Image (cartoon, rainbow, N blue to C red):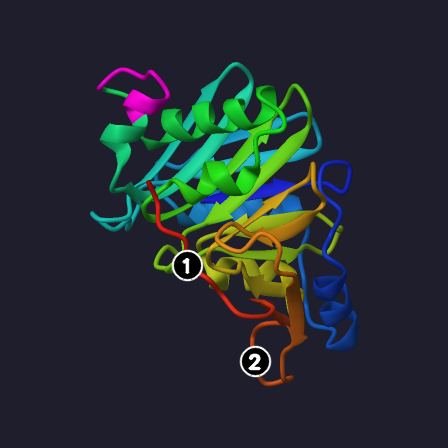
């Protein structure tokens, strides 16, 4: 999956900007990245939302245990990879039909976060059990919400293209070709919200996320980690 967002939607993380400046390397534009993704993934589906957002996904070479899916409802777009172990109980919690999949569940969870303030984001994401990574874009508010599971078994990376777009993908090599050293693994057990303007751990929301510059020989520009002691909370 691939999501590309302009600076009108997402402010590029300073740590990734600095990594690209510290170790300059070849990069390409967001449009070139999207074209390469589509050409490299048969039967891919792509959507452009104005000039600010590009979304794409394909089931080419997907894992049986980590399927990719896409959905949209009420101008809320979601790219999801993985599976939720507690999908059945969450359907009941959100009043969804038995046929509702992970994408529809995440959209409903996001709507609860958006419409029932002050509903903490860490509470919404923390109740998702399983292996997953997802992107949610709300067109009505130009809001982006990104999350990765606690184990990090579903890969998710983010980087900055040559023209300053922030890109998210499960394909590190694809992203590296467009972002050079301005790339990092998205920290597991964390979420990023443009409403908050920062990354937070959903198990330890009070702990600061720090970025450690990577050595020059690493493909990453930085590594994001949760600062301080980590406490794993039991899910209801």
Would you place residue 178 above or below residue 210 in this image?
Answer: above
31 to the left or right of 157: right
> What stretch of residues is rendered in magenta?
91-98
Instruction: Pick whichever, 217 or 90, lies toward us.
Output: 90
Would you place residue 111 above or below residue 123 in this image?
Answer: above
According to the picture, the residue beneath numbered tag 2 turns out to be 218
Residue 223 position by quadrant: bottom right
Question: What whole-number distance in Å separates the C-alpha atoms at marks 1 and 2?
Answer: 29 Å
| N-terminal label among 1 and 2 | 2
Could you tell me residue 204's position as x and y percent?
53, 56
**Numbered badge on residue 232:** 1
Instruction: Pick whichever, 126 or 79, lies toward us.
Output: 126
Residue that appears at 75% across and 51% down: 164
Instruction: Pick whichever, 206 or 71, lies toward us.
Output: 206
Quarter containing the C terminus: top left
Tell me, yes or no, whether the two marked residues, 1 and 2, touch with CB atoms within 8 Å. Answer: no
Would you place residue 210 above or below residue 196 in this image?
Answer: below
């Amino acid at each position: 999956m691939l999501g590309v967002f302009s600076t009108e939607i997402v402010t590029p993380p300073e740590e990734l900007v600095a990594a690209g400046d510290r170790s300059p390397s070849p990069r390409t534009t967001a449009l070139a990245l999207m074209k390469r993704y589509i050409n490299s993934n048969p039967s891919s589906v792509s959507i452009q939302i104005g000039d600010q957002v590009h979304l794409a996904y394909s089931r080419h070479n997907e894992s049986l245990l980590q399927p990719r899916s896409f959905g949209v409802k009420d101008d809320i777009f979601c790219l999801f990879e993985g599976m939720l172990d507690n999908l059945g109980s969450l359907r009941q919690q959100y009043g969804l039909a038995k046929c509702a999949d992970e994408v529809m569940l995440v959209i409903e969870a996001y709507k609860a976060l958006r419409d029932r303030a002050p509903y903490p984001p860490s509470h919404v994401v923390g109740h998702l059990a399983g292996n997953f990574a997802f992107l949610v874009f709300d067109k009505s508010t130009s809001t982006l919400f990104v999350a990765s599971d606690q184990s990090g078994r579903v890969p998710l990376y983010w980087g900055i293209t040559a023209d300053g777009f922030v890109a998210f993908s499960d394909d590190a090599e694809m992203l590296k070709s467009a972002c050079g050293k301005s790339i990092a693994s998205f920290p597991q057990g964390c979420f990023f919200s443009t409403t908050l303007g920062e990354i937070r751990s959903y198990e330890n929301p009070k702990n600061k996320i720090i970025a450690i510059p990577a050595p020059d020989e690493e493909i990453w520009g930085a590594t994001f980690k949760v600062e301080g002691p980590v406490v794993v909370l039991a899910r209801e």
